[in-house]
Amino acid sequence: MKNIFSHPVRLPDTLRNDAGALIYAAKSFAAAMLAYYIALSIGLERPSWAIITVYIVSQTSVGASLSRSIYRLAGTVAGASATVLIVPTFANTPVLCSVVLTGWIVFCLWLSLLERTPRAYAFVLAGYTASLIGFPAVSDPGGIFNVAIVRVQEIAIGIFCAALIHRYVLPARVSGLFNGKLSQTLQAARGRVADTLSGKPDAASAPLHLALALQFLQGISHHIPYDFALSAPVRQARKAIHDRLARLVIVNCELHDRLPAIGTLPADVQALLGDVQAWLAVEGASCTAEALRLRCALLVERYAAQAQTFDDALQVSFIRYLSEAIALLQQCERLSGAIRHAKPVVGERQTRAAKGYVFHRDPLTAARTALGAFAIILSGCLVWIFSAWPDGGTAVSILGVCCTLFGSFDTPAPHIVKYIVGSFWGVVISLFYSFALLPLVSDFPVLVAVLAPAYLLAGSLQARPPTTFMAMGITLTLPILCELGAHYSGDFAVAANTAIALFAATGFAVISMSLLQTVQADGAITRLLNLCQRDIRRSVKGTLRVDETHWINLMMDRTALLLPRLQRSERAPEQALGRLLHALRLGLSVMHLRRSDTPPGREVAALFHRINAADRHALRERIATLIERHLPAADEHTRQFVFRLVDLHCALRGPDHG
């Protein structure tokens, strides 16, 4: 009889996600109530902010929660300090005070858009805090210092409690998520190479989708130092495996480009190709990989010495790239093992020079978004000041929060609408609590029991990406409108005015951000592709001072930025990806040839100023002639030169030339 306990039981993904969401909700609620109790015990003025902080910084993993907590504390201190300097200085001129405060907020937004790592959250909070504290204090600048100090204390308590609970109560390690995603990515990479060698037609641009996996791995990797897990991956190994996977994307594209152009392969190369495909189907056979690489080296040596024509050089180039693909996959397996077991990579000296993820940064696009936010917030300030609306400061502070929290999205309006829906339910629940349940509560344990249903439901929704923003509308609205303080103070007029300010601000944010901060997908794609072409022109001129690995990793990040936008674009996805791939390979070829220190390397100087010419067919013919002039390659320097010329010839085929 088969032993039913021989294999671990795996829960379906839906049940596992539900269980994780419920655990997250329970831990977040426990942290929120602990923070609330401490804030009440020491007599803080607005203990509800400790609750809000818990739900803002809490994440589904330990590492993400702790890193977010540190960045929030740093951003809060910076934002509060800036507010204390700005508001009293310009208190006598409310318009000028609003301009300076808005300038600080959008400056922080601009920095957060340039940072593009989880550290950007510190800049977001520096602007977020200034908006929340500063605008309501414009009419009463005398108490701004005390408000800032108390707010920092409340937020620090919330951060401490969230970090404590998520760290020690059923901690969810981000390292396990990283290792699982890495395993899936490596399996997908082997599959992409296998598809290419079997001649599947869609294998050319499909590897570019690995860029999204690399971006996701980088996002997880940033939180690993805060995870405190025994199996925390080695930092240099994580960077090194990223470099190799990014390089594998290029190698796979070169293989895909050459295989159909070669025609009939010699029998020994066909046998090698079959053995490589068999090796790809069996993961972890490293001894076979060494044997395959040795066979590749012998074939390269034999056919390079006999090469007479461009087709011969193309065949040698194919075998060299095949050997590199095997080596990269083998290194990835070794690095993956080191990461899983948190051990140094034996014999992997190149990890010391690993680049890791390279982020694309666009100061002009970030400035455009920041200027849009400046116009939105300042217009709200002017309406508030000249209308003398008593709750206008609250409304503008919420408007500033919307611009900082949602400014990084291409289309912020749909996310704000989700937040408004959650806020509506938050208002309904708050009114029910404030005037039906809370008047009956007399002690803290009963209060916790009364608040539990709403917060547990909202917390479980917050753990699920599709409903995160809606849940935030509930968790952030409930403690403010219920006025959770030391004593019950159910004032319907205050609650109603706060709710009106909330919906007026978020409604205005939806309309204004749709007009001023929505980034059209086609425009963003065109901007990315134009920047790639600009970098190629700089490379041709010799003014682009980056190395091969930096260029590849930068283009992988640009690909990860482009792919989601293609879903909203009217462009054909294959055309845009083809142009990006063309730019990547062309820039790489130019870098290699420009840095060639051999005498033949100087012969390509005349080719560079014609790379952007319309008649690329003639240029490719000229390159083929130059290749044949240096065949057979008698030494390694000449072989490298021919190899790079073949790369340039293939790259110039371009996205529209098959």
Image: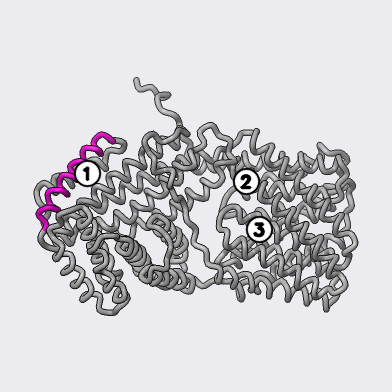
Circles 3 and 1, Cβ within 8 Å, touching? The answer is: no
State whether residue 574 appears in this view. Answer: no
Where, by quadrant of the figure, is residue 473 drawn? bottom right
Is 353 displayed left or right of 70 in the figure? Answer: left
Is 588 displayed left or right of 368 in the figure? Answer: left
Report, in whole angstroms, how far the alpha carbon at label 3 lies from the one at label 2.
14 Å
Q: Nearer the viewer, residue 516 or 6?
A: 516
Q: Which mark is residue 304?
A: none
Q: Is residue 618 above or below residue 141?
A: below
Q: Amino acid at mark 2?
A: Ser
Circles 3 and 2, Cβ within 8 Å, touching? The answer is: no
Q: Amino acid at mark 1?
A: Val
Q: Residue furthest top?
A: 1
Where, by quadrant of the figure, is residue 539 drawn? bottom left
Is 419 displayed left or right of 630 in the figure? Answer: right
Q: Amino acid at mark 3?
A: Phe
The residue beneath circle 2 is 67
Percent coordinates x, y for residue 52 in the rendering: 73, 50
Residue depicted at 82% across the width and 43% down the height: 39
The residue beneath circle 3 is 123
Percent coordinates x, y for residue 47 in the rendering: 82, 48
The residue beneath circle 1 is 276
Q: Is residue 137 above or below residue 621?
A: above
Name the element at disc 1.
helix
Report, in whole angstroms, how far the alpha carbon at label 3 lies from the one at label 1.
49 Å
Q: Which residues are magenta?
A: 286-307
Is 397 displayed left or right of 608 in the figure? Answer: right
First in sequence: mark 2 or mark 1? 2
State whether residue 521 appears in this view. Answer: yes
